[in-house]
Amino acid sequence: MGSPPPWWRDRRALPVLVQAAVGLLILVVIAVLVSNLVRNLSAAGLLLSWRWLGQPAGFDLSQSLLPFSASMPYGRALLAGLLNSLLVIVLGLLGSSLLGLLLGLCAFSSNALLRSLQRLYVELIRNIPLLLQLLFWYFVVFLGLPDKGAALQLPGLTLAKSGLYLAWFTHAGWQGPALVNGLWQAPLQVSVECAALLTGLITHFAAFIAEVVRGGIASVPRGQWEAAASLGLPWALTLRRIVLPQALRVIIPALTNQYISLAKASSLALACGFSDLYSVAETTLNQTGRAVEVFLVLLAAYLGIDLLISLLMNRINALVQVRER
């Protein structure tokens, strides 16, 4: 047997050594940056501190799932903002998925008018910046609604400039919106800021999801449709039992990117005046001056949300993949 090759020619050892060197270099760069940050903060008298989380916030929130008042601490304000963000993200994901699925299916309709309207919607919405859409829904649509007795009243729903009022089942039975002393009251109320943000996110990302759905369905061979038609299966049953299960293998990975984009885009709630995590964090930063700590909270929160979405979608993607035998 010949002697082993030197380490610089060993195909098994060389990749490990290169990766170790790159990892060491990254650690050195991080250490230098952290050291520089600590030195600058020390010079400015702003060493990292979390005591401010227990100080009274001194500001109110326009809407909060968690009871909150100005006398409560910053930590509770950030938690309330996080819950508001999670509410918008979850409802936005559900709404945009349903609307995007319907729009994607319309692309394969036998009705030419329906296909044309779907194409128009997708091209129009995808080419208008999301921020402009949010401003349109907030200032033009929702703030332009009539108020008090002139509000738009639908079965179980009232649209007014002061907010959206929904019927809900309570201990006293089914209770709808009612005008009391010139003010609308309902078991379930949504502020116009939240409504505008949700509407903008849903309509915007539904256009992208519609293209994902259309591409996934188009990836299924045409022979699958023809085989189902030869068996006399209706279009809806063919789509549900044959086409969509195969298309999900293509749709789910692309949906992950759209869902993560929606979660990050929810930070544009500031444009609508909605008290989400980013809005609360910005107010906290302006009042406390703790820039590093506040941004660390934001980074950790949004990173955690995006990683959670990615984890859930990867699990779903693993379920829909075809297993080789």
Image (cartoon, rainbow, N blue to C red):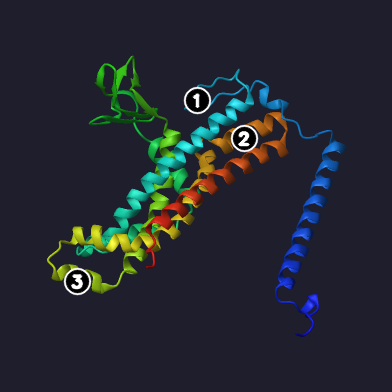
Which three-letter amino acid code belongs to the residue tagged 1? Leu
Judge the density around disc 3: few (<14), some (14-19), many (≥20) Cα neighbours within 10 Å.
few
Q: Which SS class for mark 2?
A: helix
Q: Residue at x 59, y 33 (%)?
A: 280
Q: Classify 143 as above or below 119.
A: above
Q: Classify 184 as above or below 234.
A: above
Q: Report x, y in % for residue 307.
A: 54, 48
Which of discs 2 and 1 lies nearer the camera? The answer is 1
Residue at which label 3 appears? 227
Question: In which quadrant will I find the C terminus?
Answer: bottom left
Identify which residue, 15 or 28, lies in the foreground. Answer: 15
Residue 281: numbered disc:
2
Q: Residue at x 77, y 55 (%)?
A: 27
Q: Residue at x 26, y 73 (%)?
A: 222
Residue at which label 1 appears? 66
Residue furthest out toward the top: 181
CB atoms of marks 3 and 2 within 8 Å: no
Please give left or right for residue 110 compared with residue 193 in the image. Answer: left
Image quadrant in which you'd find residue 55: top right
Which of discs 3 and 2 lies nearer the camera? The answer is 3
Judge the density around disc 1: few (<14), some (14-19), many (≥20) Cα neighbours within 10 Å.
some
Marks 3/2: CA–CA distance: 56 Å
Q: Report x, y in % for residue 247.
A: 34, 63
Residue furthest out toward the left: 232
Which three-letter amino acid code belongs to the residue tagged 3? Ala
Residue 156 in view, yes or no:
yes
